[in-house]
Amino acid sequence: MMNFFRCLLFAVLLMPIISVTASANEADVKSPSIETLVPNVALVGEARFKVLFFKIYDAELFAPDGIYSPDKPYALRLTYLINAKEDRIVSQTVKEMKRQKAADTATIESWIPAMEKAFISMDKGSFADFIHTPDGRLTLLGNGEPVSVIDDPALSRAIMDIWLGPDIRDRDFQNALLGKTKK
């Protein structure tokens, strides 16, 4: 009889550990990542973004089998070489969208609240993943953790065009990212 109570006590004490482990494993399966959203993911290319002599971030582009197509899933990872505040990231993104004429000024301005919710400050050494899926959705991760999802295909495209679009500021950077040259 005493063994029965010991087994019961052991089972009751073990149950929270088992349920926590099950929850953690379920979260791992459901959490978005480059590997879960981009099948057969492989590196396409990499580049370093600099302004004058200041290194800002390293960029890596990933796509299925290492072949980029804007119509297929792909991911861009930025590893920050500086501390970057969220408001500065938003303002630079808006500035670049306007320069590229990604949309009319009113539309770009209307996207600012969505970007303020989607972007976070990035510390030196941290990384941000921008995972684009064919449905136009953009999933953002910070150091591998989910941050936000942008469901607006026009905004998603405008963001990704900063690095991959036709009116890129630094063609050598883009070519290296696309695996066409080393930079």
Image (cartoon, rainbow, N blue to C red):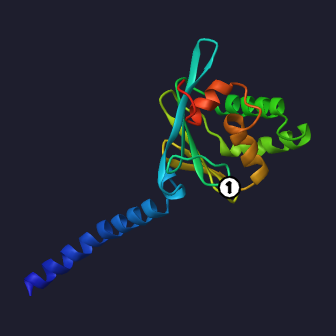
**Quarter of the figure with the N terminus:** bottom left
181 horizontally vs 135: left or right: left
Residue that appears at 59% across and 49% down = 74
Q: Circle 1 is placed at which residue position?
A: 137
* Above or below: residue 94 compared with residue 18: above
104 horizontally vs 7: left or right: right
84 horizontally vs 35: left or right: right
Quadrant of residue 104 in the image? top right
| Percent coordinates x, y for residue 47 in the rendering | 55, 28
Residue that appears at 76% across and 42% down = 158
Residue 94 or 38: which is nearer the viewer?
Answer: 38
Mark 1: amino acid: Arg
Residue 118 or 4: which is nearer the viewer?
Answer: 118
Mark 1 residue element: loop
Residue 58 seen in render: no
Mark 1 Cα shell of 10 Å, populated few (<14), some (14-19), many (≥20): many
| Percent coordinates x, y for residue 82 in the rendering | 55, 23
* Above or below: residue 56 compared with residue 180: above
Residue 117 or 89: which is nearer the viewer?
Answer: 89
Residue most extreme to the bottom? 1
Residue that appears at 73% across and 26% down = 169
